[in-house]
Amino acid sequence: MEFGAFFILVLLLFVLAVLGGGVYLIAARLRHKQLASSDDSAEGPADGPHGPRPEHVEVESEQHTHFVGTR
């Protein structure tokens, strides 16, 4: 009797682990598909749908950050 209860508990834990892993894999695949960049890469075009990207410059402090071509 005790062995049967232990076996059912182990079987239930196994089924829950498989279902949890399946849900995790589905969520990971959907998250990867949602976050995948289609054309926004470093090698992509500089002019996007929102205009050209500003050039980044090194700064000594964040308070004096400026971009080339602005003010």
Image (tube, helix red, strand yellow):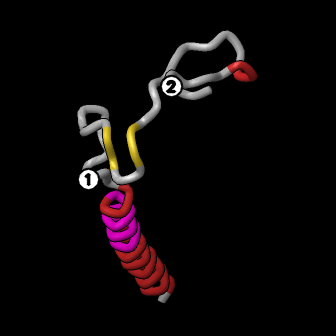
Circle 2 crowding by C-alpha within 10 Å: few under 14, some 14–19, many from 20: few
The image quarter containing residue 30 is bottom left
Is residue 39 something that shows in the picture? Answer: yes
> Which residue is situated farthest in the bottom direction here?
1
* Nearer-N-terminus badge (1/2): 1
Q: Main secondary structure of the magenta part?
A: helix
Which SS class for mark 1? Answer: loop
Which residue is more in the foreground, 50 or 15? 50
Q: Which residue appears at 42% of the width and 36% of the height?
A: 53
Q: Which mark is residue 69?
A: 2
* Residue of label 1: 38
How far apart are labels 1 and 2 at the CA level? 28 Å
What x and y, as percent, mark residue 67? 55, 25
The image quarter containing residue 46 is top left
Work out whether 9 lies above or below 48. below
Q: Nearer the viewer, mark 1 or mark 2?
A: 2
Q: Amino acid at mark 2?
A: Gly
Q: Amino acid at mark 1?
A: Ser
Q: Which residues are magenta?
A: 22-32
Which residue is more in the foreground, 8 or 55? 55
Work out whether 3 lies above or below 26. below
Which SS class for mark 2? Answer: loop
Q: Which residue appears at 30% of the width and 39% of the height?
A: 41
Q: Is residue 27 magenta?
A: yes
Is residue 14 something that shows in the picture? Answer: no
